[in-house]
Image (cartoon, helix red, strand yellow):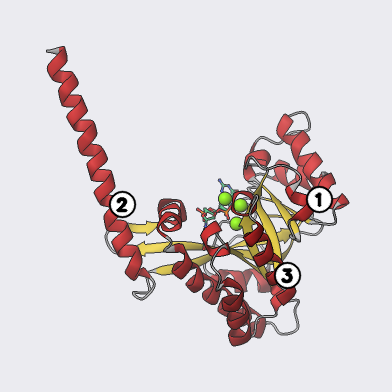
Amino acid sequence: EAKRRGKGMWIGYADEMGARVSAEAGLIRQLDQAVELGQFTLVYQPIMRLADDRLTGVESLIRWNHPDLGVLSPVDFIPIAERTGQIVAIGRWVLREACRQGAAWMAEAPDETPLQVGVNVAGPQLRDPNLVADVAEVLAETGLPPGSLVIEVTETAVVDDEESQRTMEALRALGVKLALDDFGTAASSLGLLLTCPVNSLKLDRSFVESITTVSRQGAVANAVSQMAAALEFGSVAEGIETEEQRDLVRLLGYEYGQGFFYSRPVAPERISELREYGLAPASS
Ligand code: C2E
Ligand code: MG
Ligand code: MG
Ligand code: MG
């Protein structure tokens, strides 16, 4: 009896594995066509200057309107696309769309300081020899000033990779800004900060989540803020969900903040409204 159940369980497990593998194979096939079928959209999360709670920038975040599965989060398909290399084509679409939108916001409010537009770039994109030329071309085509584009890279994508470092230098030479995303999570050495040509650090939200004046997370958040200032990097605290967290990261000297406390990622029209009317609740 136990043996039979054991065997059944094993078969069940194998079936489940098989199902997962073929579901992923299906997703990979569908990912190939998703750009041309217009299934991707970008939402934008406000980035606020903590000193005065003013909107100064946004981060673009991809969503996939999947024909059968509904709206998929990037965590469900970006890691797959990174493994298959499909991220390069998807990333090219993201870059163009975010820059086009950034230029459109500028045209809407020509007298205002342009919003900084963040675009996430994954490791395989950074190692794509065409990235720098693509970025230059998209900037020229859309008219977005290079200094309004912030390319977000993660520590894991740039650690010990000379080619990626050179690509980052070339992006900087175009006038594009670079941010080190999810800072503090990867097993990188602080020595990375000596050579990595970034303009700002984005403290990972895991530190903000349990930030208090006495927690270890708070101590690390404080140290990162001090270090960013000493190295003349900008600093952004991610994942601010409460007023207390906002107050504390502000106190620790973070310059910018981002998180559900201010706003979830929203459609581009909502960003236009936020610029015009401020951060009052959408419903009236
Ligand atoms: P990320 O670049 O670190 O983006 C921040 C993520 O944190 C977003 O998740 C955002 O919705 C979420 N977030 C923001 N504020 C809060 C908060 O207060 N609380 C919580 N719990 N979460 C918050 P999202 O949109 O699901 O994106 C997940 C990741 O997928 C991104 O992390 C990024 O690594 C990747 N990703 C998203 N869009 C793109 C893209 O266009 N290209 C590439 N290569 N990667 C992307
Ligand atoms: Mg990011
Ligand atoms: Mg992040
Ligand atoms: Mg992340």
Q: Residues within 10 Å of mark 1 (few under 14, many from 20)?
A: many
- Kindly identify the residue that appears in the image at 41 percent across and 51 percent down: 76
Distance from disc 3 to disc 2, alpha carbons, whole Å, reads 36 Å
Residue furthest to the top: 1
Mark 1 and mark 3 lie on one chain; the one further toward the N terminus is 3
Q: Closer to the camera, 223 or 7? A: 7
Mark 2: which amino acid? Glu
The answer to whether the beta carbon of the residue marked 3 is less than 8 Å from any atom of ligand 2 is no
Quarter of the figure with residue 165: bottom right
Q: Quadrant of the C terminus?
A: bottom right
Q: Position of residue 2 (x, y in %)?
A: 16, 13
Mark 3: which amino acid? Arg
Question: Residue 116: in sight, yes or no?
Answer: no
Q: Which residue is mark 1?
A: 228
Mark 2 and mark 1 lie on one chain; the one further toward the N terminus is 2
Mark 1: which amino acid? Ala
Residue 172, which numbered label? Answer: 3
Question: Residue 82: in sight, yes or no?
Answer: yes
Q: Secondary structure at mark 3?
A: helix
Q: Position of residue 6 (x, y in %)?
A: 19, 19
Distance from disc 1 to disc 3, alpha carbons, whole Å, reads 18 Å
